[in-house]
Image (cartoon, helix red, strand yellow):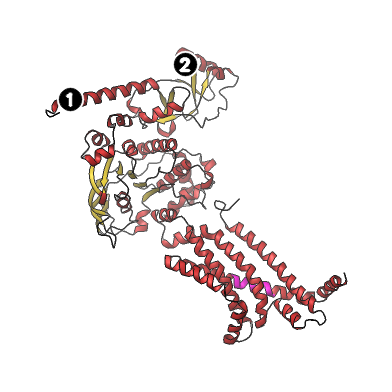
Amino acid sequence: MSETTSKAGERILLENITKRYPGQSTPAVDDITIEFPAGEIIMLVGPSGCGKTTTMKMINRLIEPTSGRILIGDEDVTDADPDQLRRRIGYVIQGAGLFPHFTVGDNIALVPRMLKWDKQRVTDRVDELLDLVGLDPDEYRDRYPRELSGGQQQRVGVARALAADPPVLLMDEPFGAVDPITRQRLQDELLRLQEELRKTIVFVTHDFDEAVKLGDRIAILQTGSQVVQYDTPEQILANPADEFVEGFVGRGAALKQLTLTRVRDIELHEAAVAHVGDDPHEAIAGARAIDREHVIVLDRNERPLRWMSLRELGRPGALQNVRRDSELESVSLGSTLNDALDEMLTSSHGVVVVTGRRNTYQGVVRVETVMEAMQDIQSAAAEAATVDTAGDPQA
Amino acid sequence: MTAVSDFFTFVAERWSVLSFLAYQHLSLVVQTLILATVLAIVVGVVASRTRWGANAAQAFSAIGLTVPSYALLGLLVGIVSIGVLPSVIALVFFGFLPILRNVVVGLNGVDPALIESARGMGMSRFSTLVRLELPLAWPVIMTGVRVSAQMLMGIAAIAAYALGPGLGGYIFSGISRMGGANATNAIVAGTVGILILAVILDVALNLLTRFTTSKGISRV
């Protein structure tokens, strides 16, 4: 597992960008000026037809702006050769857009091959990326996209976009076509990747909850790509700029704070841990010592494999050849408490495993912890509400 | 019984001539088919760039196929005189039509999101066509090629009217000597020969399609 240094993100600056389609009286994007800081995830949110996708596609010039300037880093790319430019910008679309007649490996190798990397470097890079997005290279390299689930295809889509290590990643509703549980996992993985990669990611979505969860910043757009509010999720939830934003944030903004609290912000619990190849008796003794009925088994890379009951551990050779439980409920440090709660509801253990970088085990979250956090948030919100009313003589 | 054994004696006696004619017939069909495929892909690619072009190509294909092959040959003989040339022109024309239709249908069937994703990764317009669109349209195009191949087998027989090469000459001479010695045998030998050639070519094209279509999109 090679951990090569990757290129960090570069800032993107859109300056007075306008897009006017012939035969339409109002411009699709009307004189937008916005800066996306390097290394952040910026979410473009807004109702359909507000111009958010158009705005994003002007960054890689799939749509040519009518007027204005685009800068990536300090370079003006408004008139750069589009094909050359796009090879330096990762692009992920809904449903991944993998080439069905290419294997997974060939899909990922597309841009590196266009950039004329030598063979060995391409092969190494493909394996590294598959590993990075949590797919075993030996198992998946030679498969065709149709042999993969929607979530796996989307992972390959992200790997392909990252192949040539671009500083900038554009994502156009990438997780819109997968089921809610897969979507949540993909979101967690993106956050985990971003901790390592620090790319500048421009992410288009119409799902405000997704924006709150993923965004370092959220730009809320209205028709004509007018920026109504551009701020951190916390600020937008606490101080929506106007009624339009309030409508978008929706009711229960206080409860939405639950999606703002990350698993890393709360105290994790220790579970009884055993490694593949350990002595099962020691593992049982260790679990009894801290009063646990189940043990989480990790592989050599500290990745969680499955839960085992003390009874299962008692069987001879219980810790040899432990199979990975593909249904194992887990969340990442970047997951929200909301996600953790979701996972727990499907788990039979009342706890959910927390993983960090490259899926390594960090600890567990218990239902009680989430409940406490919820109460804290609610009482904090209630307090804030009383202060508001008290401070307003007309109320 | 006598008629059948009589037929086999007829074939055995003329085996060298018949096999040479069969070779000529197949060779004419395969060569015109290749020419028609190349032309159809070029025209189809250009036509499918615009909605108008795609519709025009489809209409041209549908109308062109209603032209009777015999009539077209008659016209061509008047223009370029008797020989192999009018046969080749007629075969390329008729072979071209079903392939053109399938090229347009195949290219239109490529998911626009895939094309956008290719462009978004920095693939040029040409590279997108050659590496994405044509490979995905390929099974559909090959279906058109197989339809054309079957049709050309029959039309090549009629082309013997213009003194083109092949088994058609045998059928025509049989018809003109109807009632005479071995007339029926000549017609049957020519027809059966063409049927056998048609089956061989279809099997070969089927195999070719399988070997040239990615496992990621072939029907298994």
Q: Position of residue B207 (x, y in %)?
A: 64, 59
Q: CA distance from mark 1 to mark 2?
A: 44 Å
Q: Residue at x 71, y 71 (%)?
A: B194
Left or right: A262 as drawn, with respect to A390: right
Q: Position of residue B95 (x, y in %)?
A: 58, 71
Q: Chain of mark 2?
A: A
Circle 2 is placed at which residue position? Answer: A292
Q: Secondary structure at mark 1?
A: helix
Residue A173 quadrant: top left
Query: Of A293 and A290, which appears nearest the observer?
Result: A293
Q: Which residues are magenta?
A: B24-33
Q: Residue at x 52, y 59 (%)?
A: B137
Type of residue at label 2?
Arg
Residue B93 quadrant: bottom right
Q: Residue at x 37, y 23 (%)?
A: A268
Type of residue at label 1?
Val
Question: Is there any visible trace of residue A355 in the rendered image?
Answer: no
Label for residue A387?
A: 1
